[in-house]
Structure formats: C-alpha cells, structure tokens
Amino acid sequence: MSEKENKPLEIDNMYLVRRYFQPKNVIIKEIGNRLIVTIKEPENTEVATILKKDLEQINPFKKVSIVFVRDYKDGEVKNDKWQIKGVKNIIAIASGKGGVGKSTTSVNLALALSNLKLRVALFDADIYGPSIPMMLGYDKMPPSSYDGETFQPFKECGIESMSIGSMIANDTALIWRGAKACGAIEQLLTQTAWEDIDIMIIDMPPGTGDIQITMSQKIDFSGVVIVSTPQDVALIDAVKGINLFNKIGVPILGVVENMSYYICEKCGHRADIFGHAGVEKTAERFGVDFLGEIPLHYDIRVNSDSGTPIVQSEPDSPYAEAYEKIAEKIAQKLKLK
Ligand code: ADP
C-alpha cells in the first residue's frame, strides 16, 4: 500500500483521539493486529473506554489498547517505570496462549537460577490462573506484613516469591479489566520487601493483550523468554508474542520449547508427539535464540502440581538438567555468570 493510501486511516484515528486528548500528547502505533494508543496525560479510564470503542468501530480488524504514561520521548516511554526496589534484573516468562507450561517453566527456571548461586525472586502476574503458590507449596496462605506498608515475600525452596493469586479469589481474576489488574500487579510488585535480588522472574499472563503491553512499558525488563509447545496453533501465538515484544523494545532472550518430546520409560523410545523442532525453526525464522527444549514427562507435571518442582525434587534427573541448561544460558546472556 502506498503512503498516500495509508494516510486516511491515520487521520481518522487521530481525529477520534483529539476529541479527548491533545494530539501532541498521543502516539498511535500499529503492531500486528493491535492498535496501541499511548497517552501522556492523567489517566481517565471512562474516556479511555469510550475512545477504545470508537477506535474499534473504525478499525474492525484491530484490537485497541490505550495506555496512559507520565513521560515519553520519540515514541518510547521514559521515566515512567514502576520502581521495584531491591531487584537488579527482571525477566518476563511469556507465552502466546495459556496451558503451554509457562508457569511450570517459570518456577523450574527460578530454582535452576538459584542453584547457580544467584538470589532469585519469582513473581506470579498470571491473573487468569495464578499457579505459583500451588507449585511452591504456599497455596491459600495470605502474605504477611511487619510494618503495615510492605508485604513480606514468601520464602520457599530457597527463592523469594509473591503471587497476584494472594490478592484475589480465583474466580475474581477473569472479570478484572486491564487497568485494575495492572494496578494490583504494580502495587504488589512495588510494595513487596524484596531483599537484594539478582534476578526476578515474572510469570506473565498468557497472550498479548492490554495487561502485557502495559507491563512491558512500565517494567524495566532485561529481557523476555517466550515459551511455546511445538504445535502450529501454539507457534502462531508465540510469533505474536515475538512481534509484540520486539516492537515494544523488550529484548527477546530466546524461546523455549516445552512438551517437546516424550521418552517411554519402559523402552526408552523417543516420541515427538507434537512434531519436532517447530519452535527452533520458528526462532531461526525470526532471528531469535532457541534456548532449549523440555520434554513432556509425568514427573514434571506431578511435581509441579504438588508443590515440589522437579528441579528441587529430582535434581539429578535429565528433566532438571534441561531446565538448568536454559538457566545457564539466561544467566550468561544477562552477564550474571
Ligand atoms: P501455563 O502457565 O502456560 O498455563 P502450566 O505451567 O500451568 O501452563 O502447565 C499446564 C499443565 O501442564 C500443568 O498441569 C503442568 O503441570 C503441565 N506441564 C507443563 N509442562 C509440562 C511438561 N514439560 N511435562 C509434563 N507436564 C507439564
């Protein structure tokens, strides 16, 4: 499409936006099927809801996200990051869709990084299915506070952690809107008394929606690891994740293939149940690093669902080793080793 043909759409979008906000305070970006409107004005959720509907009407094939920031320059958000004290590096573990093993990967990578003698924190931001408390064995325990102002992180399995699941009943999460969810995530992240953490892992909500976009702009991420299973449907969503983080400017540390293959315990036969090397090929195609593959195994599921993640409960198994190799690569990339 020529530049000329492109223009009317831009004008229409800005035409709608300028009814509520100063055009000089607004940046409109298109990322894949998303239209992201970044506004440097005080947050106004009522107007944002109306504007979002208006924009969706003239962009029927796009999902619209509206993000308020305090400052930005040349399209990049500046000086508006959440202040997370006591933490040196933060990485996101993300996935294009739910159920691919993002949380299982987060928890086992956190433990594998801790085995490298790093001080590790794990933050569960998955409002749609916060599972870290169950995986680390502190399910249903409320966080405590010594001073009435900051939360004490949970200290299980040698790492510090906190979950958005501690703040909400499981059935409430789904009805939260973007702004409310982000407010809760910000509060918990910035008001937890993290102690001298070398690396924090954030288990992101699945997908590439408003919450993920806001978090990517407000958290000073050192990078993101994208988890996918090898099926085509999962890969399509993983690619959406790669595109989103690329465009927002969060460095992609690499991709991990989970449930990669199955080894029969009786005969040792390897079965590539969902096909082979799909994630590695996709990584190559998009110029991002392939960090490694995790097999599909009964023990990984049972241990992660019963509060004893495999890196801790079966440290000498090949499954723990698979996570450890990936953790080493992450630590090297961040120059922590
Ligand atoms: P997500 O965070 O992407 O929604 P989870 O980590 O909660 O996914 O994993 C979904 C289910 O799959 C859980 O029951 C988990 O124990 C299981 N699972 C994840 N990875 C593996 C694996 N490599 N082998 C066996 N089961 C796994």
Image: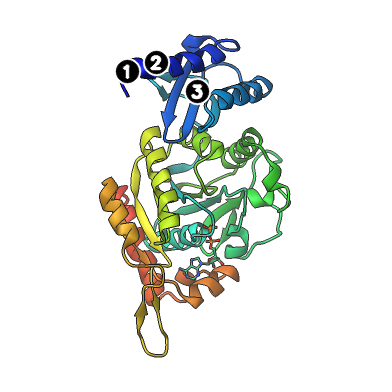
What residue would you read off at disc 2? 7
Determine the residue located farthest toward the bottom in the rendered image.
Answer: 266
Q: How far apart are marks 2 and 3 (CA)?
A: 19 Å
Residue displayed at 40% across by 59% down: 113
Q: Are marks 2 and 3 in contact (CB under 8 Å)?
A: no
What colour scheme does the image use? rainbow
* Residue type at tag 3: Thr
Q: Distance between the residues labelled 1 and 2?
A: 6 Å
Q: Are marks 1 and 2 in contact (CB under 8 Å)?
A: yes
Residue displayed at 31% across by 63% down: 277
The crowding category of the residue bearing disc 1, from other C-alpha atoms within 10 Å (few below 14, some 14 to 19, many at least 20), is few
Residue 92 image point, x, y percent:
45, 47
Seen in the picture, residue 293 relative to 207 is either above or below; the reply is below
Look at the numbered disc 1 and say if its residue's Cβ is closer than 8 Å to ligand 1. Answer: no
Residue displayed at 54% across by 27% down: 67
Nearer mark to the viewer, of 2 and 3: 2
The disc at residue 3 is 1
Q: How far apart are marks 1 and 3 (CA)?
A: 23 Å
What residue would you read off at disc 3? 38
Which quarter shows the N terminus? Answer: top left
* Residue type at tag 2: Lys
Which quarter shows the C terminus? Answer: bottom left
Q: Is mark 3 on a helix, strand or loop?
A: strand
Residue displayed at 30% across by 52% down: 283
Q: Is mark 2 on a helix, strand or loop?
A: helix
Seen in the picture, residue 250 relative to 3 is either above or below; the reply is below
Residue 323 image point, x, y percent:
39, 65
The crowding category of the residue bearing disc 3, from other C-alpha atoms within 10 Å (few below 14, some 14 to 19, many at least 20), is many
| Corner quadrant of residue 232 | bottom left
